[in-house]
Every structure is written in C-alpha cells, then in structure tokens.
C-alpha cells in the first residue's frame, strides 16, 4: 500500500498590511528629524536643496499645493471606492494630525528658513507664500505621508502602486524644502508623524465603524456626487497657487473618475442587496 504523504503547506500569503515596518520607518524619521533640528547641518542641507532644485518653480509649486489636506483627501477618496475604511482613516488622521501638528508648532516656535536667511540672501529663495514662524513640524509632510501610508497599507507587497505612493509622498515632502517653507528636520518629523498616523488610525475601532458607514449604498452615492464638485472647487479656490489649465483638467478628471468609481460600487452594492 503506497504511503500517504502529508500535503505540502501552501506558501504564506503576501503581507497586505505591513504596518510594523511602516511604523518603524515613521519612528526613525521622527528620531532623525529631532536629532537634526537646529544643527548647522540642517541649515546647510536645506539651503543646498533649495538652491539646487529651485530651477523648476512650477513643478515644485504643484507638488507643495498637492500636499494640502483637501488635495490629499480628494486623491485618497478617488482611489478608495472599494476600500472606504481608508477614507475613514484619512478623516480621523486629518483631525488628530491637525491638532498634533499645530500644537507642536505653537509649542516649539521654530523659525522658518526665510526668517533665518532673510529675504536678501544671495542664494536662498522662496517660491510662493512667505512664511516666518511655525516651522516644526511640516504639516504638508504629515498629510502626504498619511495619505501614502493609508494607500500603501492595502496594496499588495509586490504592487508597483505602493512604490508610486512612496515616490509621490517623497517628492511632495521634498517640495517643502525647495519652496523655502521648511527645514529638512521639519520634513522628517512631519513625515514620520504622517506614517505613524496612517498606522494608528487604521487600527482604531472608530475607523472601522466609520468605514462600514461610508460603505453603505446611500453614503457611497453621496460621496460619488461630492467628488466632482470638490475637484472643481479646488481648481478655483485661492490656495496659494494658481493652477495652470492642464492641472485643472487633471484635477477635474480625478474628481469625475473617483465619483464614477464610487457610483459604480454603490450600484453594485444595491444590486447585491436586492438579490438577497
């Protein structure tokens, strides 16, 4: 009688929620930023980045504009029709992160690069709004890395989209140095806060409950109807940078595409409920 062999164990599925490495990177960024804060190296690196990459002001202005909370919300929501919990996480992160970042800014009172270098500096330049106070930490960096973290948490480990979110967030955070708004230490600490926020809010019970509510057919239809006008409002709002026509078309296309995806999911959910 042939011997029966035990079935070979199937390989473990790819880790679709790599929250531990993400949290470790976020913590390391905060520690590195705190260690760098106020050192001459912080100023020299900031000045070198500002001078070396400041030749494309429109490009960096777009990236720093796209790091605003409302822009991040539009992008994440448009990409999360099948994962409403990410939107719930973003809403919680915006509230918690906003309170944390602004509390730190008021407590630390770190001067911006413009206040240190001065407007008549031969090399340093400011692209966009001239800011003087509240440098540490970078709120833009916290926002973009919270968005990237939430998007990456539900992408497969081998998904190229995951790397695209990391690359986009890196450029958006870097833009804050290029436009003369922040020091490298500000960006590191803000980025670390955003990564830790993405992990923390994902594991909150309120995020799961809010995500289930956002996944209801009626709420999905409301989100579908909200995204296109939100995109149009972004194109016309005065948020520190006048959007070129090409960028306006891209933002409106993102809003329409996101609205269509949420509408399609709402219809699919209603059909599934009707079938049962």
Image: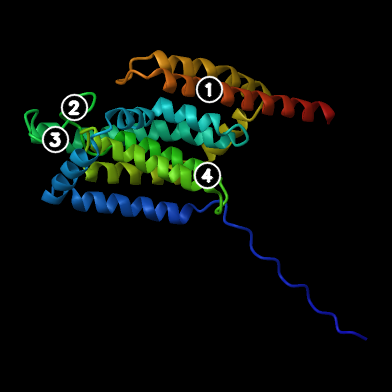
Q: Quadrant of the N terminus?
A: bottom right
Residue 161, numbered label: 4
Labels 1 and 4: the sequence-earlier one: 4
* Mark nearer the viewer, 4 or 2: 4
Mark 1–mark 4 Cα distance, whole angstroms, equals: 19 Å
Density class for disc 3 (Cα within 10 Å; few <14, some 14-19, many ≥20) is: many
Labels 1 and 2: the sequence-earlier one: 2
Could you say where residue 117 lies in the image, as x and y percent from the top left? 9, 35
User: Please, what secondary structure does the residue beneath circle 1 have?
Assistant: helix
User: Please, what secondary structure does the residue beneath circle 3 have?
Assistant: loop
* Marks 2,3: beta carbons within 8 A: no
Say whether residue 203 is visible: no
Query: Residue 57, relative to residue 27: is it above or below?
Result: above
- Answer left or right for 230 relative to 219: left
* Marks 1,3: beta carbons within 8 A: no
* Mark nearer the viewer, 1 or 2: 1
Q: Nearer the viewer, residue 202 or 166?
A: 166
Could you say where residue 221 lies in the image, as x and y percent from the top left? 64, 20
| Residue 226 position by quadrant | top right
Say whether residue 180 is visible: yes
- Answer left or right for 192 relative to 51: right
The residue wearing badge 3 is 124
User: Please, what secondary structure does the residue beneath circle 4 have?
Assistant: helix
Mark 3–mark 4 Cα distance, whole angstroms, equals: 35 Å
Mark 4–mark 2 Cα distance, whole angstroms, equals: 34 Å
Residue 253, numbered label: 1
* Mark nearer the viewer, 2 or 3: 3
Labels 4 and 2: the sequence-earlier one: 2
Density class for disc 1 (Cα within 10 Å; few <14, some 14-19, many ≥20) is: some
Residue at the far right: name it. Answer: 1
Could you say where residue 109 lies in the image, as x and y percent from the top left? 16, 35
What residue appears at the point 37 percent right and 19 percent down from the top-left corner? 243
């Amino acid at each position: 009688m042939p011997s029966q062999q035990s079935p070979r164990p199937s390989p473990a599925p790819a880790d679709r929620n790599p929250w531990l490495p993400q949290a470790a990177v976020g913590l390391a960024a905060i520690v590195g930023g705190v260690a760098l804060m106020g050192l001459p190296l912080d100023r020299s690196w900031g000045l070198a980045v500002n001078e070396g990459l400041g030749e494309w002001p429109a490009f960096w202005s777009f990236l720093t504009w796209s790091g605003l909370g409302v822009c991040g919300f539009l992008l994440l929501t448009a990409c999360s029709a099948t994962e409403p919990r990410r939107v719930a996480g973003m809403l919680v992160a915006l509230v918690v992160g906003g309170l944390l970042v602004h509390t730190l800014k008021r407590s630390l009172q770190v001067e911006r690069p413009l206040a240190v270098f001065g407007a008549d500096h031969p090399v340093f330049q400011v692209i966009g709004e001239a800011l003087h106070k509240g440098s540490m930490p970078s709120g833009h960096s916290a926002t973009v890395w919270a968005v990237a973290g939430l998007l990456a948490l539900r992408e497969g480990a081998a998904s190229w989209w995951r790397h695209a979110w990391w690359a986009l967030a890196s450029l958006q955070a870097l833009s804050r140095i290029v436009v003369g708004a922040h020091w490298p230490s500000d960006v590191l600490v803000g980025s670390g806060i955003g990564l830790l926020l993405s992990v923390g809010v994902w594991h909150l019970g309120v995020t799961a409950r809010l995500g289930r509510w956002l996944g209801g057919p009626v709420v999905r239809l409301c989100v579908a109807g909200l995204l296109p006008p939100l995109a149009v409002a972004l194109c016309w709002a005065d948020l520190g940078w006048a959007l070129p026509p090409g960028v306006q078309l891209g933002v409106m296309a993102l809003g329409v595409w996101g609205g269509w995806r949420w509408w399609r999911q709402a219809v699919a959910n209603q059909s599934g409920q009707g079938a049962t």
